[in-house]
Image (cartoon, rainbow, N blue to C red):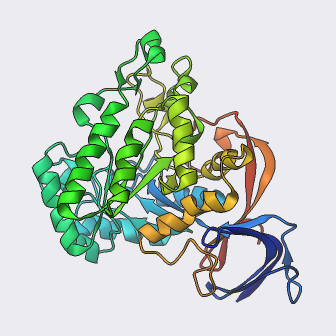
Amino acid sequence: MSTLLTNVRLIDPETGTDTLGWLRIEDSLIAATGSGKAPVSGIDCHGHCLAPGIVDIGVKVCEPGERHKESFRSAGLAAAAGGVTTMVTRPDTLPAIDTPETLEFVTRRAREASPVRIKPMAALTKGRAGREMVEIGFLLDAGAVAFTDGDHVISNTKVLSRCMTYARSLGALVIAHPQDPGLSDGAAVTSGMFASLRGLPAVSPMAERMGLDRDMALVEMTGVKYHADQITTARALPALERAKRNGLDVTAGVSIHHLTLNALDVGDYRTFFKVKPPLRSEEDRLAMVQAVASGLIDIISSMHTPQDEESKRLPFEEAASGAVALETLLPAALRLVHSGDLTLPQLWRALSLNPARRLGLETGRLAIGTPADLVLFDPDAPFVLDRFALRSKSKNTPFDGARMQGKVIGTWVGGKKVFGEA
């Protein structure tokens, strides 16, 4: 099977280039690329952009336990429509993915139902309760790509240090949610004048810095491979920069919502804007954008968290946190390109290349011989988002009714087209 895509802008995050050229797919791999006119005629892409498929770390698929919110099939279809070719799924299911048997179930369901690649993460402690370490070795053998308790922060430092030490001995990646659990418990928004005026329970940005400071000390002590799932405040950036400068094996991510929205978007208690950590100040948002541009923050993710109407149609303090984002990740991220804050290669470095490298995957590049996981998109196509048109089962997006730019035209996984016209 051979496919030749011509007259296309090749967005290569590895070389940092954006050039008009062509790309040929043979079977499941990228066989050849070139600039200028293609040697023979192929599929004319009309000058649209072709980039490596997005590798999205931190997607919640609600199997097992809450399939009514999101299934592997619905999440896979949403991912393909959003240009996401690899979903790195979270273990915060019911029950948690903390045994090889549960992980095997998830892997089998994903293989049967999803058109895109699934790389599952496993819990770091049993039941994500922060008390007893999982069988990291057995879960690695079963296919876990990383270990995390998600937003259940392990408050017992001795337990976390033991987990990190064991993970270090096996070369496993630990992903943590840097927050001080005591300060952030019960918080719905970030502290400040807006939170006070709205009368909502709030958390100081210092809670994130305190959590990251503790984690960095443990990383220095154990030597573990560590990834912070979300850095959202300017106060946490010096600790991250210092850890990298000192040679610790540390990377960090940020969600698309913290890059494109701020605390004032909550407005009159709009629960679709309630995420975890809560949205931050505009100053923090701008600092995160700059950190992505400089490379201090490595990865942008959707932190796709489906919630049904019943859990969102509640008073703000009681409503569930989270937003769906598989289909909105690309157009929302392109806001940073249209504003001049990032170039397309810089953006795809954070969306594809860096997450693939962190997990040891071959994807995320346009190099010859790598898997043909690709997304073809028009970065300028305007549209108004209708949440009821999303393919996710849950429709809890803060971008409902928003004017956006950037539409996916086609998505390929392993050379097979999984979205777009045949």
Q: Which residue is drawn at 84% across and 70% down?
A: 45
Q: Which residue is drawn at 39% across and 71% down?
A: 108
Q: Which residue is drawn at 78% across and 71% down?
A: 19
Q: In this view, does 263 lie to the left or right of 53?
A: left
Observer able to see residue 393: no
Q: Residue at x 52, y 56 (%)?
A: 295
Where is residue 30 drawn, in percent x and y? Answer: 65, 84
Where is residue 312 drawn, in percent x and y? Answer: 47, 30
Specify the quadrant of the image occupied by residue 47: bottom right
Specify the quadrant of the image occupied by residue 43: bottom right
Depth check: 153 or 142 in front? 153
How many marks the image carries: the answer is 0
Q: Is residue 113 above or below residue 301?
A: below
Where is residue 110 drawn, in percent x and y? Answer: 45, 67
Q: Is residue 307 above or below residue 188?
A: below
Q: Is residue 46 above or below residue 388?
A: below
Specify the quadrant of the image occupied by residue 374: bottom right
Depth check: 313 or 300 in front? 300
Where is residue 26 drawn, in percent x and y? Answer: 68, 89
